[in-house]
Image (cartoon, grey):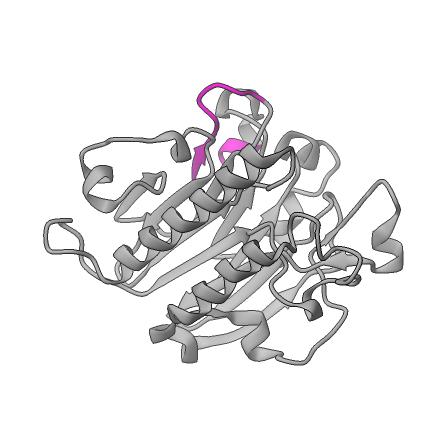
Amino acid sequence: MRIISWNTNGLRATYKQGHFDPLFTDYSPDILCLQETKATPEQLPDLVKNVFGYESYFSWPEVKKGYSGVAIYTKETPLHVSYGIASLAKALAEERNDLDSEGRTITAEYKDFYLITCYFPNGGGGPERLDYKLRFYDQFLKYINELRNPSTDSGRTGKPVIFCGDVNTAHNEIDLARPKENAMNTGFLPIERVWMDNLVKNEWIDTFRTLYPDMKDVYTYWDQKTGARQRNVGWRIDYFFVSSDIEKKVSDLITLKDYYGSDHCPIMLDISL
């Protein structure tokens, strides 16, 4: 099985610039997960909404347009699709909270696993947004832990979990080009990195770093304004994490560093499921 994750930084622009179709024609993913789509379905061309051979699902902010948003394209029909990271009991009751108002997550349930595409909040813009990001982080970890080991009243069956997307934090110094200069900047703050530590302590596996523990200079995001991509002054903030029970099923995690169309590049997981 092949799954691709990509922060498009605007799906309409990605399509107009010719960077959408090659994901399907060149790589033929079983599932494509997109983040920061910045569009509602009615704003997208039919050829983007309806890709031959795939079913598509979209989530977008309830209020703010042209912001956030995620999507999943899948060859296999999921058993169930849900939106948001409310606890499983609340999700079943179709309840939502402020963490689910920005269209940041889609969960697709398949026979043998759950898959989540997620665009995690950026902590910039002041203390309120950093607080929002940290609250989102904490609730997300509760959510994925519940998916893996649901409570008896959730009505769910525990399954392996894969989640992918723009986590908006570089975990360790090896994961960005200039760690010292960014030690006090959001995306590499100690409090953000502690959450990443906690994620790993909860037996969630960073597939790239597990496969390539010492590989340097591999990034997924570069600042466009400074031409950082040409100099490879970047950040690795896009991830595929898997629950530890399927760690051995991961074949490879490939960073498509030469694929353009966004300030992020796609990442591609090959896994035997």
Tell whether 149 sits left or right of 266.
left
Residue 73 in view of the camera: no
Provide residue 177's location: percent of width, then percent of height: 78, 63
Quarter of the image where one finds residue 145: bottom left
Image point (83%, 60%), residue name: 232
Tell whether 21 sits left or right of 232.
left
Tell whether 35 sits left or right of 201.
right
Q: Is residue 22 above or below residue 39?
A: below
Pick the quarter of the image with the C terminus. Answer: bottom left
Q: Residue furthest left?
A: 153
Q: Is residue 71 above or below residue 218?
A: above
Image point (69%, 57%), residue name: 220
Magenta stretch prevailing secondary structure: loop
The answer to whether residue 240 is magenta is no
Task: Specify start and end residues of the magenta stretch as a single range.
Answer: 48-65
Of residues 150 and 40, the one drawn nearer to the viewer in this rendering: 150
Residue 159 in view of the camera: yes
Provide residue 174's location: percent of width, then percent of height: 70, 70
Quarter of the image where one finds residue 230: bottom right
Tell whether 168 sits left or right of 109.
right
Image point (60%, 63%), residue name: 171
Q: Is residue 260 above or below residue 208?
A: above
Image point (76%, 49%), residue name: 260
Provide residue 229's location: percent of width, then percent of height: 83, 53
The answer to whether residue 58 is magenta is yes
Of residues 57 and 45, the one drawn nearer to the viewer in this rendering: 57
Pick the quarter of the image with the N terminus. Answer: bottom left
So how many labels did they put on this image? 0
Of residues 21 and 100, the one drawn nearer to the viewer in this rendering: 100
Provide residue 152's location: percent of width, then percent of height: 10, 55
